[in-house]
Image: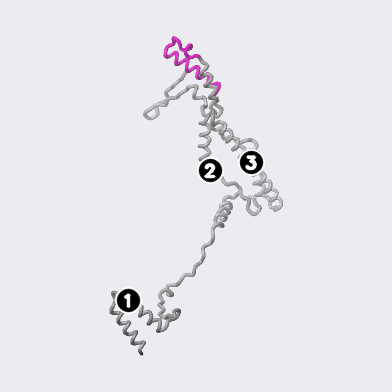
Amino acid sequence: MVETSLGAPALDHRHVHNNSPFCRLNFHHENVMWEDINTALKEIDWHQLMDNLSPVSIYELLYEKLIRVCEKNVPVRTDKKRKNIIPKDRKVLMRKRTKLVKQMKLSIDINWKRKLANKMQSIEKQLILSHENERKYAEMKAVEAVKRNPKFFYKYVKEKAKIRSPIGPLKLDGELVDDTERICAALRSQYDSVFSKPISYDVLCDTELDEVHHDMTDVNFTEKNIAEAVAELACGAAADDTRLLKKYQMKAIAD
C-alpha cells in the first residue's frame, strides 16, 4: 500500500513523502511494454475477483494487481548521474590525447612534433566517430520507440533541441589546431573572405564645390541659333519680355 509521512515543518507547511511502489518504476523509459500491460490487465476476470467485496477491498485488490503487472513490464528508475557515463574506449582515447598534448609542449624536435600531431589527428577522428556512433544508436532507439512509447521519443527530441555542438579542432595549413584564439581568427578570416572590398570613390573637396565657373566652353551656338530660339517663344505670363526679345532680335538682324 501507499505509505505517507509528514516531515519536519518548513515555513508554514510540511512536506509529504510518497513511498508508493509506482515511484520506483520509470514509465518514461523506452523499454516499457505497454502492450503486455494491456494484455495482462484484460486477461484478469475483474467481475469474479471483485464480487461481494467492499470498496476498500476492491481498491486494495486493484492496487495489488496493477503493481504486479507493472513490476514485470516497467523498468526500475535509476540514478540520473549514471546517464553521463563515458564509454571505456572513449576514456582510453582521451587519456592518450592528454599524453600527446603534454609531449608536444615539451618536445623541441620538429619531426617528432609532426608524428605526434598525426597521432593526435587520428585520435580526434576516432573520438568523432565514437560520438557519431553513440548519437546514431540513440536516434535509432528513439525512432523504434515512437509507436510503443511516444513519450520517450519526444523527450529525446526536446533534449537534443537545446544542445549546442562545440567547434572541434581545425586543420590549418596541414596543422591540427585546437587553440580557441586561432580557431576564432581562422573562422573570422573565412567569414570576411566572402565579402568584396568597397570601391574607393574620389571625394570632392569643399573648395572645389564652392567654385563657380561662368565659362560656357562645352556648348557651341551662333547668332542664328539664338534668333531661332527667340522666334519660337510664345507669349505667356511674361508677354512683355517676349515682345522685347523679339523686337531686339529683329533690330540685331537688321544691323
Residue 192 image position (x, y, % from top left): 55, 57
Instruction: In the rendered view, tell whether residue 32 sits above or below residue 55.
Output: below
Kindly identify the residue that appears in the image at 53 percent across and 29 percent down.
Answer: 149
Task: Determine whether the residue tagged by mark 1 lies in a helix, strand or loop.
Answer: loop
Which class describes the residues within 10 Å of circle 2: few (<14), some (14-19), or many (20+)? few
For the residue marked with disc 1, what is the amino acid?
Ala
Outermost residue to the bottom: 255
**Which residue does the numbered mark 3 point to in the structure image?**
129
Instruction: In the rendered view, tell whether residue 232 sits above or below residue 127.
Output: below
**Which residue does the numbered mark 2 point to in the structure image?**
164
Which class describes the residues within 10 Å of circle 1: few (<14), some (14-19), or many (20+)? few
Kindly identify the residue that appears in the image at 51 percent across and 65 percent down.
Answer: 199
Identify the mark nearer the N-term, 3 or 2. 3
The quarter of the image holding the C terminus is bottom left
Is 69 colored magenta in this rendering?
Answer: yes
Real-space Cα distance between discs 3 and 1?
A: 89 Å
Inspect this view and state whether residue 74 appears.
no
> In the rendered view, how is the structure colored?
one colour
Instruction: In the rendered view, tell whether residue 55 sits above or below residue 118.
Output: above
**Which residue does the numbered mark 1 point to in the structure image?**
234
Q: Label for residue 59? A: none
Inspect this view and state whether residue 11 appears.
yes
Magenta residues?
A: 45-73
Q: Are marks 3 and 1 in contact (CB under 8 Å)?
A: no
Q: Mark 3 or mark 1, which is nearer to you?
A: 1
- Look at the magenta stretch and give its main secondary structure: helix
For the residue marked with disc 2, what is the amino acid?
Arg
In the depicted view, which residue is nearer to us: 226 or 26? Answer: 226
Left or right for 250, reference 129 = left
Left or right for 224, reference 237 = right
Identify the mark nearer the N-term, 2 or 1. 2
Real-space Cα distance between discs 2 and 1?
A: 78 Å
